[in-house]
Image: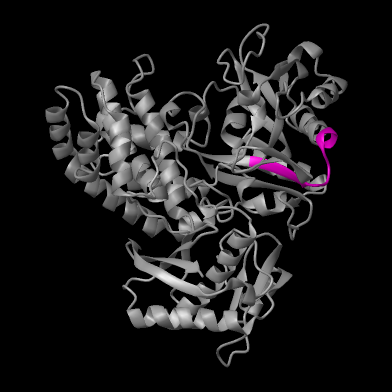
Amino acid sequence: MKADELKKKYLKFFAEKGHAIIPSASLIPENDPTVLFTTAGMHPLVPYLLGEKHPAGKRLANVQKCIRTSDIDEVGDDVHLTFFEMLGNWSLDDYWKKEAIEWSFEFLTKVLKIPLKKLAVSCFVGDSAAPKDAESAVIWQELGIPKDRIYFLGKNDNWWGPAGLTGPCGPDTEMFYWTGPGKPPDLITGDNKSGWVEIWNDVFLTYNKTKDGKFEELSQKNVDTGMGVERTLAVLNGYDNVFATELFQPIIKEIKKLAKTENEPASTPKRGEKSIRIIADHLRSATFILGDQKGIVPSNLDQGYVLRRLIRRAIRHGKMIGIDKPFAFEIAKIVIKEYSSDYPELKKNKNFIEEQLVREEEKFSQTLENGLKQFTKMSEDGISGQEAFILFSTYGFPFEITKELAAEKGIQIDEAGFNEEFKKHQELSRTATEGRFKGGLADNSELTAKMHTATHLMLAALRQILGDHVFQKGSNITPERIRFDFSHADKMTPGQIKQVEDLVNQQIKKNTPIICEELTLDQAKDKGAMGVFENKYGDKVKVYEIGNPSTSSGQAFSLEICDGPHAKSTGELGHFKIIKEESSSAGVRRIKAILE
């Protein structure tokens, strides 16, 4: 089976079950707490999982592009990836366990024609926070799954979420495919490497985890499912690893060509197989991050740091297998070619992707040799945290590369000391291994809703004062403050900052109601609503009108497509003040602001 066929079959199946097909959202989350990247299809849906009405209805399905870096050290084995596509279907307080499980079973056995003898399932065993999920087990047994193929496992295996530190979560039931010969063994854990491969997960979002670690029952019950395209494709085609699928073979072929290993006889040992897989995965991920409409560039902070780490790790593994020239952009060309039909933003941003990869590879190549010399000098008696930080800050070595080099040579490294130095350097940064920060909206509280509303007004004011080239490039909104990145090359003058503050505060003083309309995408465009119109929105969108017009256009002061929470009127916001304006990255400025 081909990837396109799998995706089309999935979406067609759930469309026939009454699901609206929604497009993949950005890899950079807008409304989900404490994460750098969209790691699951449910991330863009958090407001709706918490009770907001979705314009497309209560049943949704899509193919979502995702990035996860928590298992980055496992990449190179048979199944782990940093970028992947996730098939998902959701019920927003509509159907529940019976329908979700029955449809999963029907799709697996009737549409994909997987034999019953190849399947096993697991359910949540229960703990002090939530009861045993006996209901799901009964449904599976009624469908024909033998009782001895239904396993009860703990929270590490059969509990999903929250996506960040807080949010919707709950027990899940997972489906496994037997890939080995003969009679399969018992499924001891979801991490079992004995031939069982997890291919689907039905999550029953019953609880909301609070900041203090409590699990509160949600006012509405939601179903959230996930099936990884790459892993399922490998299983259906009888491959023992995801890199054997059509999704990776063109990329791997190009890597081997660059490494001059494409003509090696099949009987020879596979030279650099793990490095080839790491390069293929990391540069596929980097291409998608760079191609995203949010315009992330390599840097030493947040998403930019993860991006830099992926690119530089791929470059180092390229050198390890004998690639002796700039090559990252060549791999990106293959990724763009293979994926542009589903993700047109890649083709649109092709020049930007290639330019950034060439620039980053040049930077890293210039510092790699000097950095390796310094590493050799430092490593005689182990590497202190301060030395590891010097390699990072002076020589451009992501800490993980220093860590890998140390492991290869059996050298001790003071990781705790490095982390302490890193925190001193930049309080807001987080280690890329953890791969998370308070991104988008920290929560959906009343205070955060006010801050979010003020951000709409601020963007409109910035465009009036600085020009129509200004667009949002990222945000981090908490109940205490706004952090907002926007496209603009020059430092704002004190006069421009005051003008923006004055425009926002004028709208606050007018105390106008905030109006939300559900419109088709064409209607929203015709009305002049701001949005990123690249494969992001569904058939219906929410358009927020905020404030009275300050020009002769007659249009609301702010008119944006948005899914986040908002205040009811501008008068609720208080007084807006910009406390800092600084550079974020090339061509991007950052504002920090508060409501007093």
**Residue 596 coordinates in the image, percent (x, y):** 51, 70
Residue 529 visible in image: yes
- Magenta-highlighted residues: 87-99
**Residue 527 coordinates in the image, percent (x, y):** 65, 79
Nearer-the-camera pick, 165 or 526:
165
Instruction: Name the outermost residue toward the right.
Output: 142
Q: Seen in the image, is 189 located left or right of residue 355?
A: right
Q: Seen in the image, is 247 located left or right of residue 512?
A: left
Q: Quadrant of the N terminus?
A: top right
Q: Does the stretch in magenta take in 96?
A: yes
**Residue 511 coordinates in the image, percent (x, y):** 64, 81
Residue positioned 74% across, 49% down in the render = 60
Nearer-the-camera pick, 21 or 406:
406
**Residue 80 coordinates in the image, percent (x, y):** 50, 29
Q: Does the stretch in magenta take in 104?
A: no
Residue positioned 71% across, 40% down in the render = 216
Q: Is residue 105 above or below residue 266?
A: below
Residue 559, picture quadrant: bottom right
Q: Is residue 230 above or below residue 37?
A: above
Q: Seen in the image, is 294 located left or right of residue 174?
A: left
Instruction: Name the outermost residue toward the front.
Output: 596
Residue 494, picture quadrant: bottom left
Residue 333 visible in image: no
Q: Is residue 391 above or below residue 136?
A: below
